[in-house]
Amino acid sequence: MNCPFCGYRDSKVIDSRDINDGIRRRRQCLSCGSRFTTYERLQPTGLFVIKKDQRREEFSKEKLLAGIRKACEKRPLPIGIVDKLTDEIEAELYHQGKAEIPSAVIGDMVMERFKKLDYIAYIRFASVYREFTDITALKQEIDTLVSDETKASRSTSQLPLLPAEELGTIAKRLQRSRK
Ligand SMILES: [Zn+2]
């Protein structure tokens, strides 16, 4: 917080006290010596996510970003796509104006975008988010994807289909997580 009098960027706290919903700090500018007051409050997002087990958790953009980033790891996707997707989904969530949103709805929003963008990111995200219990369920999901793709005219923006090696990695991870 810059000094409101001279604009200097550093000040020292000369008094600090808890108020109802935050902290009030009395500061003194290290340059001109003027005193001013700042208030620190927690900014609630006002948006809660209803998890599968019905617990509520405050929406976390960081969590969403981490999930999307993981799915996109080492994929030849445009630079900035992870942030772009996260921002888009966040904006859409707030735009809905609801206080609570099921985690499944957010997951579907991510998958909808990955489906148009990159199958591998889609499958990776799905394998975590849908918690495929076995390789059969995962295989079904992939088959659905592939047949959808065959039915529709092949989109030029779509990246190459799932290579066997990626499928193998996901299968191994599923087997590990079942033990
Ligand atoms: Zn100052």
Image (cartoon, grey):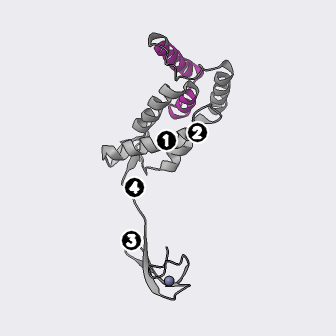
Which numbered disc flags the more N-terminal residue, 2 or 3? 3
Secondary element at image label 1: helix
Residue under circle 2?
79
Q: Residue most toward the left? A: 97
N-terminal of the two: label 2 or label 1?
A: 2
Magenta span includes 140: yes
Q: Is residue 46 magenta?
A: no
Which residue occupies 60% across, 38% down?
70
Looking at the rendered structure, the kind of residue marked 1 is Lys
Q: Is residue 78 left or right of residue 37?
A: right
Q: Position of residue 139 (x, y in %)?
A: 56, 18
* Cα distance in 3D space between marks 1 and 4: 20 Å
What is the distance, in whole Å, between disc 2 and disc 3 at their CAs? Answer: 40 Å
Q: Work out how far the residue at label 2 is from the one at label 1, CA to CA, in angstroms.
A: 9 Å
Q: Earlier in the sequence, mark 3 or mark 1?
A: 3
- Report the residue marked by disc 4: 45
Badges 2 and 1: C-beta atoms under 8 Å apart? no
Mark 3 and mark 4 lie on one chain; the one further toward the N terminus is 3
Q: Position of residue 10 (x, y in %)?
A: 56, 78
Q: The disc labelled 3 sits on which kind of residue?
A: Asp
Is most of the magenta stretch helix, strand or loop? Answer: helix
* Residue name at image x 60 percent, y 20 percent: 160
In the orientation shown, which residue stands out farthest toward the front? 6
Q: Is residue 171 left or right of residue 6?
A: right
Give the label, 3 or 4, closer to the camera: 4
Q: Which residue is mark 3?
A: 21
What residue is disc 1 on? 84
